[in-house]
Image (cartoon, helix red, strand yellow):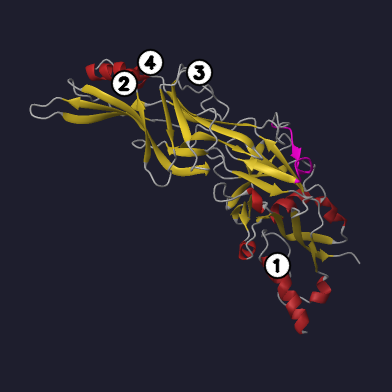
Amino acid sequence: MKLLVIILCSVLILVSCSEREDIPSLEVGQDFTNSNVRILSIDTLTVELSTYKFDSIITSSSSRILVGQYTDDIFGTTRAESYLELTPLDYSVSDDAELDSIALILNYDGYSYSDTTKLSSINVHLLKDEVLAQEDVFYNTSKIAYEEIPIAIIEYYPEPTDEDSLHIPIPKIVGQELFEKIRKGDVNDENEVRNELKGFTIQPGQLDDSSVIGFTVNTGETYLRFFYTVPGEFEDDEQTFDLVINSTPSFPTYFNNIQSDVTGTFFEPLTNQEINLPSNNANNRSYIQAGVGMVTRIQFPTIKKISEIPGTGTILDATLRIKPPPETFNDLIPIKDSLSVNISDQNNDLISQLFNGFGSVFAGISENDNEFNEIAYEIKLGVYLEDELSEAPEIDNALVIFPENFNNTVDRIVLEGENSDDFEAQLILTYAIYDENE
């Protein structure tokens, strides 16, 4: 009798902890022997992982400027360069002001990726054209024509957590005429400023192999500063006048171009978004790289074989476990604590984020694995797979996972595939059969 109570309690706990609210459940006191409920644990269903790359992702809604370049043994060379327009918040400059110097101030926002102990360089170029989006957005593939010769070049060791900002001297000749026209009242609005100074592109050196650094776009933290003097009767008054990033969702004035040179890597075949790179063709692994647009795609081609089990059943719980190889991340290239889980169609276009009865679904690192100094992502997929079982007609959709800050970082992740010798991607199902045919 004690064994019967233990089994019945276990079934009720499994039902109550599942992701769905509409699955059948046993009534308290119901005779277990008459219910014909069986609980099965299934871990042999096929999991297919692959990698694909978005044709483009929007970066004009990013919360930071990204600048830098580094080379990775797996992902090739990743390069981030920024394009921006700067405008005044007001046009108040003293009539007798005298321009002393100009500097571009970039405030660190704390983000960095790869080795900041290596020397980096920044090249500032003047734009030839306006920062004007044709479709109200800019993408990681967008570019604006710029002057070939930079107006400023600096070399520096990034200190994104120890210093506030980076100070880049700009030649006076670049802003002298604009400053004089603002001082005289000849320039009074953004269009007039744009005619005088279309903007800048901030780029890493062509040969850099160091890191990608994040700078804030907040007004008052990243700006072009004019240092000027107002002559006084006894002492000159030193003042400043700033041009800042002033962007709105409907009129973006900055974006990041983020590209990678994948020559000689697994990713050379990914020339358009509809091409999938199976993990079997990529060292039994799948890959993710933010900013560049690379994601992991997941399908379960044999999930409907569950219907071949005699009786009526339901998925009580489903957990996908995927492990990042330990040698693919470290302090300089850290792993992400969670990944966004989304649904894509047969053309690899995103449909929506994945939800269950508790809200958005994320791939999170298992706490149990942390106790043993291992890291594995777990994704709860009961609702999704139950919907897949009832889908009619069958649709060739898939799950897609990537970091949440996908458009303003260059974070990359490697995941073991379904045939990895070290850790096979595994789907573990708890399946209840509650109306078995006799």
- Is residue 91 visible in the rendered image? The answer is no
- Of 117 and 30, which appears nearest the observer? 117
- Report, in whole angstroms, how far the alpha carbon at label 2 lies from the one at label 3: 22 Å
Q: Residues within 10 Å of mark 4 (few under 14, many from 20)?
A: few
Q: Give the percent coordinates (x, y) of residue 109.
A: 43, 42
- Label 4 vs 1, first from the N-terminus: 1
Residue type (three-letter) at the residue carrying disc 3 = Ala
- Picture layout, residue 141 above or below residue 35: above
- Label 4 vs 3, first from the N-terminus: 3
- Label 4 vs 2, first from the N-terminus: 2
Residue located beneath label 2 in the image: 172
Q: Residues within 10 Å of mark 1 (few under 14, many from 20)?
A: some
Q: Which mark is residue 145?
A: 3
Q: Give the percent coordinates (x, y) of residue 115.
A: 52, 43
Give the farthest residue toward the left: 233
Marks 2, 1: nearer the viewer: 2
Residue located beneath label 1 in the image: 14
Q: Which mark is residue 195?
A: 4
Determine the residue positioned at 80% across, 69% down. Answer: 37
- Report, in whole angstroms, how far the alpha carbon at label 4 lies from the one at label 1: 67 Å
Which type of secondary structure does the marked residue at label 3 adopt?
A: loop
